[in-house]
Amino acid sequence: MEKSTRDVILQRLMQTDWISGQDLADQLNISRTAIWKQIASLKEAGYAIESNKKNGYHLIDRGDHLTALAIEQYLQTKFFGRDIFHVEETETTQRIAHDLAQQQVKEGKLVVCDYQTSGRGQLGRVWHETKGNGIAMSLIVRPDVPLDQAGQLTLVSGIALATSLREFDVPVTIKWPNDLLIDGRKVAGILTEMQTEANRISSVIIGIGINVHHDVFSTAIADRATSLKLATNRTFRRAEIVASFLNQFEQMYERWLVDGFGSFVEAWEHLADKLNQPVTLRSRQQTLSGYLRGIRADGTLMVETDQGMEAFHSAELVYWTEN
């Protein structure tokens, strides 16, 4: 994707200590006045830029932005995230990603926004968001695997996200099948949706929401939700978190395509919340209690009950009472 003039100027500021307005104007073949206007626009967007007549412009702080340029500086991927569609605000990144997938965009395209007004979680639940404090993103992948294996991408995504957050010293665990927790409170959720064509997978849209800098939550979820900031008393660069996930996930995705989910069982169990502890599991047919014993190579959850070991493809662990 071609960078805007503003993005090119920002990139130059990131690459140098000080740069003069004349040098920028010469490099971009535009006027000094145009440079000044773009610098003003960057300041309005939240970038801290110092300027003086002698040295020109200096980027003091890169800030906390989710633009393509902000994410790209941390990327180590070959494909994932190399084409980014960024919006300041949208109802849901999933909807945009579905539309783009139907337009046959390449695998690895990422949709990301600063504020998602109608985010969705598993089972149609609402994903609560606060402007500028979280991450909402959707990644388009096109795996050449049987239809019944697509659900494993939720699990692989969870491992990749948990691994990347632990690189920031955040003690997350995975609540099967699609939530990440810190001390029993939800900090992130994953929603995978599939597009099919002639009994084959056309695309899988992997939607991820992360609570990053939230300070408070509504009364309805205050006892079950947390953010990275609340849990660690630290601040984060959201772009770095996005890139860290993509760096991890691309490697794991390529491995999954070759070796299947069986090669991830040990990693998932290492990150699993309540492994070998009592749990309650709810499916469409029943609610039962037992001990969470692990996961199989096909992604099914194993729960030991009084009647013996039972396997579940589709269910959820019950942690909280719905309001």
Image (tube, rainbow, N blue to C red):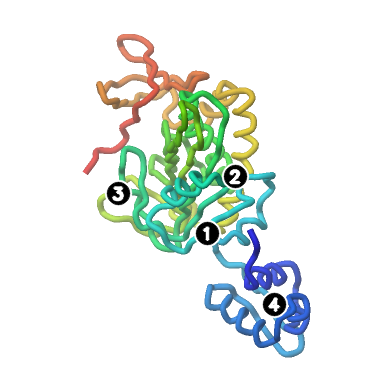
- The 10 Å Cα crowd at callout 2, few under 14, some 14 to 19, many 20 or more, is some
Mark 1 and mark 4: Cα distance apart in space: 25 Å
- The 10 Å Cα crowd at callout 3, few under 14, some 14 to 19, many 20 or more, is some
* Residue at numbered disc 4: 58
Mark 2 and mark 4: Cα distance apart in space: 36 Å
* Residue at numbered disc 1: 86
Total marks drawn? 4
Mark 1 and mark 2: Cα distance apart in space: 16 Å
- Tell me the residue at 49%/18% (across/down): 296
N-terminal of the pair, mark 3 or mark 1, is 1
- Tell me the residue at 49%/47% (across/down): 138
x then y, percent, for residue 145: 55, 26
> Dot 3 lies on which element?
loop
x then y, percent, for residue 78: 69, 44
- The 10 Å Cα crowd at callout 1, few under 14, some 14 to 19, many 20 or more, is some
N-terminal of the pair, mark 2 or mark 4, is 4
Residue 188: quadrant of the picture: top left
- Amino acid carrying label 4: it is His
Q: In the displayed structure, does residue 164 sit left or right of residue 221? A: right
- Amino acid carrying label 1: it is His
Q: Nearer the viewer, mark 3 or mark 2?
A: 2
> Dot 2 lies on which element?
loop
Q: Which mark is residue 106?
A: 2
Image quarter hosting the N terminus: bottom right
Work out whether 62 lies above or below 155.
below
N-terminal of the pair, mark 3 or mark 2, is 2
